[in-house]
Every structure is written in structure tokens, then in C-alpha cells.
Image: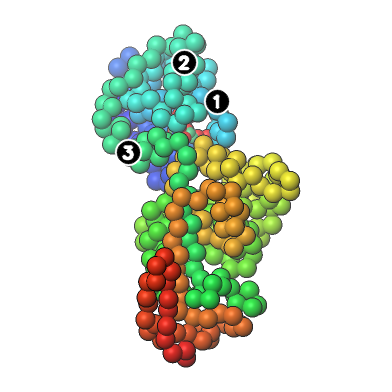
Amino acid sequence: MRRALALARRGKNTFPNPKVGCVLVKDGKIVGEGWHDRFGGPHAEPKALKKAGKEARGATAFVTLEPCCAHKGKKTPPCADTLAKAGIARVVAAVRDPNPGVSGGGLRVLNRGGIKTSVGLCAAEAKALNADFLARMKSKKVHVILKTALSLDGKAKTENGKSKWITSPRARAEGHKLRAKVDAILVGVGTVLADDPSLTAHGAGRNPVRVVLDSRGRTPRNAQVLDGNAPTWIVTASLKTFRNAQTIQVPLRQGRLDLALVLKELRRRGIARLLIEGGPCVHASFLAAGLVDEAYVFLAPKLLAGARDPNAAPRLLNPAIKKIGPDFLFHSQVR
Ligand code: AOF
Ligand code: ZN
């Protein structure tokens, strides 16, 4: 199991999936090894089985996580069935899979196939290895954080649709820090078409998953979100596929994506904290559906009404900020 844990640690881009290692042992000898290397890639078990070939029959599998079973949204064939088919005699797992779609189900599939199972060997190490994944799986619903950047007169874009950049580089860096703390960032395809954002943490930390709400599959082939620099999921009702992105098919309800259903699909894929970055229509839909838990509102001391370039917009110089009851008053000369 210690060897399996060491292999699991080699996983590079498994987020939001866990790190998993697998070692197959027969007659006291290792006959196969594998680990889950990146999100969307093969799981640890089939890789180890491939190495072992025929030697897998009658072997014991040491896995750092309960092998997965069939559940909705799965991308890879279920490992429990694959292990059973290969003739594995016994499975020793370090911890149960906290994924509600799996938890206990993988062990049940194995037992039904006459395979002996046990859970708990090196459990503490295995839990430490995937502390982040375990915590995310425990929370049942997606925590939704809304982030918006506006001018003082409440505009998110200029007359001609320019929204890059309303706030200063320092405020934007703060936004990147926020990105590094969430599991996924969500935008509407309108934002992709208008601004072509990269939606990465820009070195402020780990890159979250980039989620694009794109009911008709309009994300352009050359969009930055499809550059492969971070995982991208396109939530769509169309049958289109995209290079460097996974699609999540969600049916339309009254011509729109059902946001509660979208959150459910994201939750199932391991997203517990979601940052909504825009645009205004996406914000409005999430707010109207009552799905927002937290908000960050960046205000730039500019007046965008009538402006064509955010940088050239009239600004309030060093405004005095007064809190009046629940409201804020900004006052200064305009330049
Ligand atoms: C395993 N072995 O190596 C990993 C497992 O979306 P999928 O098809 O990749 O499945 C992801 C889920 O599978 C993930 O949420 C977790 O429950 C489990 N991860 N299971 O048997 C592996 N990485
Ligand atoms: Zn699996």
C-alpha cells in the first residue's frame, strides 16, 4: 500500500479527481502498477492491469481508494468491473471513495463478483493524500460565489461592449487570488465571445476548472479557454465536441440551461466552490434563481456611461467614501 501511495503522488493534473495508486501483487511479487495521472485520463487500476496482463488472474490489488463503479457522469469504464473481469482475487483499499456516486458501491460490485475486499490499510496516509478531494466530496451542494467588476455608475461594459479592463491591475490580481481558491470558474459564452478571457489564476495558485455555459456550442475553436492550459468543461445542449475540453450535456428547459441542474452536474464532478465571473446575463440568471451564496463586487472609480474605452472614461480622483446607513457615497472631482 505504501508503494501504491507513492505512485498516487506522481499524479500531476488529477484535479478535481483524487490521486490514486494501484499495485497488483501475486505470490509475493509485484506484477503490475499504475496511477491516475491526469483528470479525464485512465484510472490507476486499468493501468496496473494492463502492465500485469495475464498475471493479474488471482492477484491481490492494493489501491489507495475504493475502486469506482458505474455512476452518472462517469468518463472512464468502472474499475470494480474491470478488476473483476481480469480475475483479481482480492482488493485491499486504503479508504472508501467519498464520492456519493461511488461510496461503498465499488466494494459491493467486487463482493458480488466473489472478490474478497478490505478497507483501512494506511487510511491516514491515504486521507492526507486527498484531503482536498475528501473535503470537497463531503459538502453536498455547490457554494456559489459571484464576482463582478463595475464602474461607479454600475456599468460592466462601455457603450461599445468593452469590459476589458474596468478595474486596475492590482484589483485584477486580487481576482486571480480568488480564482486560485475555488474549484471552478464559470462564465457564459457571451463573455468568451466578447473578451476571450484565459480564466486562469495567472500564477496566483492552482488553476481551477474553466466552465463555459454554452447551450448552442458557440465557443470558438481558437478561444483561450480551449488552449489546454487548464481543464475546461463546456456545458451545452448541443452535440458539438471541442478540442481540449469536455462537454457536459444538459437538456434545455424553456430554451435555457437549468442552472440548478448545471450545479448538480458540477457537484457530481467534484466541484464544491464555484466562482461566477459573468457576464451580466449569467449573473442575473444565478441571482434570479436564488443560487448565489457570496459576492465580491469590485468598483472602479470611473463613470462608464457614454465612454467607449474603459481607460479613457472620466474618473473620480481619490473619492471620499462615506457609509450612510446601508449605502455608500463616493464624492470627488471628476477628471
Ligand atoms: C478509481 N481509480 O484512479 C480514480 C478514481 O470521471 P471519472 O470517470 O474519471 O471518475 C471520477 C471519479 O472516480 C472520481 O470522482 C472518484 O470518485 C473516482 N476516482 N477511482 O477507481 C482512480 N481517480
Ligand atoms: Zn476507477
User: Residue most toward the right?
Assistant: 255
Q: Identify which amino acid the numbered label 2 is placed on.
A: Arg
**Label whose residue precedes the other's in the sequence (3 or 2):** 2
Residue at image location 39% in from the left, 11% down from the top: 116
Q: Which residue is mark 1?
A: 70
Is 258 displayed left or right of 88 in the figure? right
User: What residue would you read off at disc 2?
Assistant: 108
**Between marks 3 and 1, how big is the CA–CA gap?**
24 Å
The one of 285 and 54 positioned closer to us in this rendering: 285
Residue 95 sits in which quadrant? top left
Q: Residues within 10 Å of mark 3 (few under 14, many from 20)?
A: few
Q: Earlier in the sequence, mark 3 or mark 1?
A: 1
Residue at the image position 39 percent from the left and 67 percent from the top: 325
C-beta proximity under 8 Å, tags 1 and 2: no
Q: CA distance from mark 1 to mark 2?
A: 12 Å
Question: 207 and 309: which one is in front?
Answer: 309
Q: Residue furthest front?
A: 325
Mark 3 lies on residue: 131
Q: Which mark is residue 12?
A: none
Q: Tell me if label 3 and label 1 are in contact, CB under 8 Å.
A: no
